[in-house]
Amino acid sequence: MKEYENDLQYMKEQFAGDGTEVPESLSEEAVFAMLENVPQQASPFPGEAEPRKAGRRRWQKPVAAVAACACLVLGITALHPWDSGDDPVPAPPATGAGTEAAALLAAADTDENGMVVFGSYEELDSLIAAIVPEEEDYLVYEEAAGDAARVESAEAPAAATGSTGANAAGDTGSAPDHSSTYTQVDGIDEADIVKTDGRYIYYVSDYDNRIRIASAKDGKAENIASVRGDKCGTYIYDLYIRGDQLVVLGEAQESSFSALHPFNRRASVVTVFDITDRSNPQQTGQYIQSGTILSSRLSGSTLYLVTNDAIYTYEKNRCFPGICFAEGDWEDLPLGDICCFPETATPTYTVIGTVDLDAASISADTVQTKAILGGSEEVYCSQQALYLSTSFYPSDLTGDTYYLDGEDTLRTRIVKLALTGDAPAFAGSAVVPGWLNDQFSMDDSNGLFKAATTTSRSGRDTNNLFLFDENMQALGSVRDFAKDEHIEAVRYIKDKAYIITYEQTDPLFIIDLADPEEPDIIGHVKISGFSTLLVPASDEYLLGLGFSTQTNEWGEATDGVKLALFDISDAAQPAVSDSKEFEGMESEVQYNHKALLVGPDGDYYAIPYEIWTYNVRTESYDTTDGILVFTAKDGKMEVLKDIRTEDKVRRCVYIGEYLYGICGDDTIEGFAIP
Amino acid sequence: MSNDYGDAMEEVILVKKAQQGDRRAFCDLYSLYKEPFYRYALYRLGHPADAEDAVSECVLQLWHRLPTLREPAAFRTFAYRILSACCSRLIRTQIERRGQDNADNDTLAGRPELTSTDHTDTRLILEEALRSLPEQERQIVLLSAVSGLNSKEIADITGLSAGGVRSSLSRSLKKLRQQLTS
């Protein structure tokens, strides 16, 4: 389930109901008349009346460029050649962008991991020139970048609000027991919009583009300081807290960082603050790398930032990934730190920055950056390694079809970067058929790398699990289970994989990984609705959070939040021991695991929610906002507390016996639990 | 946009006929896309007359180039790539019309003034909300919520990765929804 499914549905409805009417001049009849005497381009595939036969994978004629997406827009600027008796638009040249890129990649060197490497910047530049789409529309008309201010240097004090008098360093003594962001892997932190250290709550303001710091005690929270967004890029994304360090991740748009990016690209910014005095954060360093944030992780003292750096417009020798620091100039990455996925033609770099937060200063000596040409989609990080995935069609280079005789050829390449050395280093990669649902589809515990994918064959979905060793060499697999369903949730626990698929029967599958050469589905249980997040509640029980569904005349549709508790004590006979449905409810936890709060020792779980009801009178939606607190013990779930709030709750945290809801209007409400 | 296998097959047949020069089949095909084409152009250009120009231009290019489309099933991406380029060219023309002296940084500042005779109230509200997004994010939202393209198709048209499209959409849609419901 895509994380924005709810919002997308809402926007679709808004647009569909906007009262737009297509004018008469664009009716079918008007178009019919418009096209009279307008010639069509000659087909480059004469005589191909038969459907393509099995086995014939490429066109026989070298006019491949014709269907290459990039080349379709060649000649668009040659307006209306038919209305002045001119010759029709000439057929594009035989070697279009797609085939040129394929040729360049085929001729390039590869390293021991199978990644394409470049002998010179010219070589990389030629490849970029070949794959950036010909149309130059995107940024040519963007506002001319003014003289934007450079990011200020280290001493800039942050704007403080609220009581700022006394040094707010917090009490001596240890902080009370508190929650942390719900993450995929223990010990690997993931950035989020809200964090707490047991004395303060740190959060990204929803409407004010700043980070706020609130002191929290005995159920009450008070904003005491803030850091402005424009000190951390243009737009704050999320943050980490490490002791007395606040690490802010932001994104910069061209116009404000044009002094750094004279060539129209996005950049991501890591800003580190010393918050020993909580009321007065002091910037201690800043690192900027090209691209928009895909994901990040914090492992020990090392921050990994992964960005996608898209090239929209080709400019000679200006399309390399780069970095800079609070002081100093923009630098292109050295050639030795750039490689390329061998099969992709996406003009986007994945940039991986490694920042040592314990270093005395953030500089080129303490930060390492690598880039891969070909953007990434999912990031999975364990103690041992960082994995990046990217999906592609083998035919991407030529803009060819997505289907090969009815078989969807979408594949995913997963690249492993080992984290055990001084810097992340490539340690192998693998290609699997199909696509990954999300980061939870991957896992590398017990020396085995696992990836669960959904593939599509002849228009029907089917699902698989693949196992690899530490060198990304294939071991065993389970193929083609749950036909006509796709994966919605995966969790790997010890030597088993737990997978939820949807739609129609929506079962939970348990796959035994004890023998990596022969993994096996050993048990499954059907349940209506589907989970998008699986949480180990105990050794015997698995908690599923997700969607309830109902079937109407249009088919199956989601209609609320569903909680399910699976008894997995006997893997061959899993059972649903309890479930609860909440109709009309939506919760961010349905598509973002970080929205889940696990109470102390798993005593309770809490999720923020909204209930949308259509108000016929006002012709818009009313919302009811709140926090659902529930327990899952001994096979049963109980609602402990249903808290209603004034405003939408973005996240919940707990400190001691208090649960705090951080709301969209920058207020924090505290509630005693139980 | 149809998810139904039967509808998809029907569209493929229309594309193939149109590729052979069947104008009526092309118009039947066009009728499936007419509304999202116009709506997409309207939100990108802001002015009904410009949107009409963009869609007319697109239709002509589409008819002319259709025989070069190798795979009829990829018609949708093919069509929106052309429409997107037609809109982009017109945007540049709009800006040239207005000169380079935009005082504020709003990329829509070069657009004609919106009047209530041009637009319904809902459209004005949606326009306003869309203004809060940078041009590329706006384009991605429109391709998704108006045109019904998936992230892979949008990635093909914009040159981003599918993952980049999804993260952009996630942020933009959330922002829009919050603005529209507050």
Image: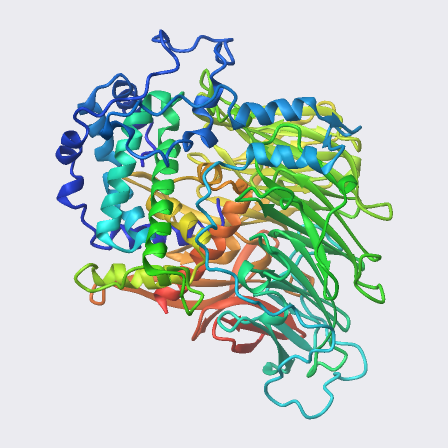
Q: Say which quarter of the image contains residue A471.
A: top right
Look at the picture and state if A151 lies above or below A315: below
**Image spot of residue A506 (x, y percent):** 47, 37
Q: Position of residue B135 (x, y in %)?
A: 43, 54
Between A583 and A343, the one nearer to me in the picture: A343
Confirm whether residue A145 shows in the render. yes
Q: Position of residue A469 (x, y in %)?
A: 78, 30
Q: In the figure, is residue A151 to the left or right of A595?
A: right
Q: Answer with the quarter of the image where residue B33 lies.
A: top left
Q: Position of residue A606 (x, y in %)?
A: 56, 63
Q: Residue at x 71, y 50 (%)?
A: A185
Horizontal side of residue A20 vs B85, given as left or right: left
Q: Is residue A561 visible?
A: no
Q: Classify A446 as above or below A456.
A: below
Look at the image and tell me in which quarter the C terminus of chain A lies.
Answer: bottom right
In this rendering, would A235 be left or right of A361?
Answer: left
> Most extreme residue toward the bottom, as rendered?
A165
Q: Which residue does the image show at 58% across and 25% down from the upper left?
A: A100
Vertical comparison of B154 with A50: above or below? below
Which residue is at the front of the view, B21 or A264? A264
